[in-house]
Amino acid sequence: MDKDRIVGAAKEIAGKVKEGVGHVVGNESLEADGKLDQVEGKVQNSLGRAKDAARDTVDKVADALKGK
């Protein structure tokens, strides 16, 4: 699993917490920052998934070329 997937998931969770805290205390800026963190986390997680998929494809092609 690519580290971007892990970091991205952590950013998403932190963003949800930040958004929730901002909502509870009535801080719109904090709430918006939390939403932004969630989007950044989703993008980073998607990047990690793409890297994993690319690695898997390369591995399959290499195995096919080796005759496995």
Image (cartoon, grey):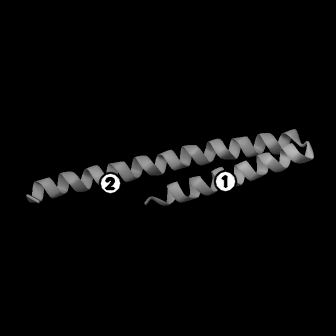
Kind of residue at badge 2 = Arg
Residue at the location (72% across, 41% down)? 35
Quadrant hosting residue 66: bottom left
- Near mark 2 (Cα within 10 A), the count class, few <14, some 14-19 or many ≥20, is few
SS for tag 2? helix
Q: Where is residue 47 drawn, in percent x and y?
A: 48, 47
Classify the position of the N terminus by image quarter: bottom left
Quadrant hosting residue 10: bottom right
Relative to residue 67, is residue 3 drawn left or right? Answer: right
Residue at the location (57% across, 45% down)? 42
Kind of residue at badge 1 = Ile
Tell me, for residue 55, which label it has, or none: 2
Q: Earlier in the sequence, mark 1 or mark 2?
A: 1
Tell me, for residue 56, which label it has, or none: none
Q: Is residue 6 above or below residue 45?
A: below
Residue at the location (71% across, 49% down)? 15
Q: Where is residue 27 drawn, in percent x and y?
A: 89, 43
Q: Are marks 1 and 2 in contact (CB under 8 Å)?
A: no
Classify the position of the C terminus by image quarter: bottom left
Q: Where is residue 34 drawn, in percent x and y?
A: 75, 46
Q: Which residue has dot 1 on it?
A: 13
Residue at the location (33% across, 49% down)? 54
Which is closer to the viewer, label 1 or label 2?
A: 1
Q: Where is residue 33 drawn, in percent x and y?
A: 76, 44
